[in-house]
Image: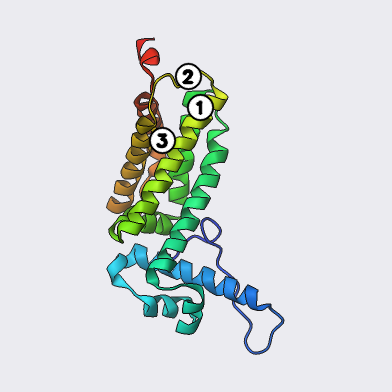
Amino acid sequence: MDRITDGVIFTVPAGLPRGRHVLAREQVVAAQRERMMIAATELLAAGGYRGFGVREICARAAVSRAAFYECFADKDACVHAAYDRFIAVFLARLTVAANRGEDWPGCVREFVAAYLGTCESDLVAARAFGVEMDALSRAARDRRRAALTHLAGFIRELREQRFPGTIGDTPLSAYVGAIYALRQIASDALDAEPVPDLSALVPELSTWLCRMVQSPAEERV
């Protein structure tokens, strides 16, 4: 079973010392929680949501069931916590990247490159949360919907702040559609190929994603 890439979405904790040690209880719990989220991510990517349970998470993370239930109410809570981390890291990286563009097409190009580059840098987490996550439950889909709508709103606001007057009457739904299109193409590539060349998609996707959110005034130019 493939493992996540350390330091991208999750950081693999150092092994806890055996016997008596000076680590605070909070440090121990934090390390165990991280290992359980990593284990759930790897299991989700490898076999889908129905392919594992709390027992498998505990075994892969090398923690007791008591330790698991100290951190999470159930399997869904563990997977959702891991997904929330995934989204938080994505948003942070995309925010930095999109602000690097010198013009609007440049912002889109940087954004797309960061999105696909983050997926490429941890294919296990990308498959878990870009491919398998939608099959979990209504709560998981609600999380995905909220995250992508937030991302679309961020891009629209960034455009208005950095390039005032360029939005025109392009609605938020156009940005939501563009984000969904980017996510679906990346998800399909992750699902179809063991090691997809996502970076090769940047030029083409950047061009037509820009067109998806053009205002009528821009289209007439």
Residue 68 position, x and y percent, is 47, 77
Q: From the image, state whether disc 1 or disc 3 is nearer to you.
A: 1
Marks 3/2: CA–CA distance: 23 Å
Q: Looking at the image, do the residues carrying marks 2 and 1 touch, with CB atoms under 8 Å apart?
A: yes
> Which residue is found at the position 45% from the left and 22% from the top?
167
The residue tagged 3 is: 202
Q: Amino acid at mark 3?
A: Val
The residue tagged 2 is: 166
Q: Which mark is residue 159?
A: 1
Marks 2/1: CA–CA distance: 7 Å
* Mark 1 or mark 3: whose residue is earlier in sequence: 1
Q: Amino acid at mark 2?
A: Thr
Q: Looking at the image, do the residues carrying marks 1 and 3 touch, with CB atoms under 8 Å apart?
A: no
Where disc 1 sits, the SS reads helix
Whether residue 166 is visible here, answered yes or no, is yes
* Mark 2 or mark 1: whose residue is earlier in sequence: 1
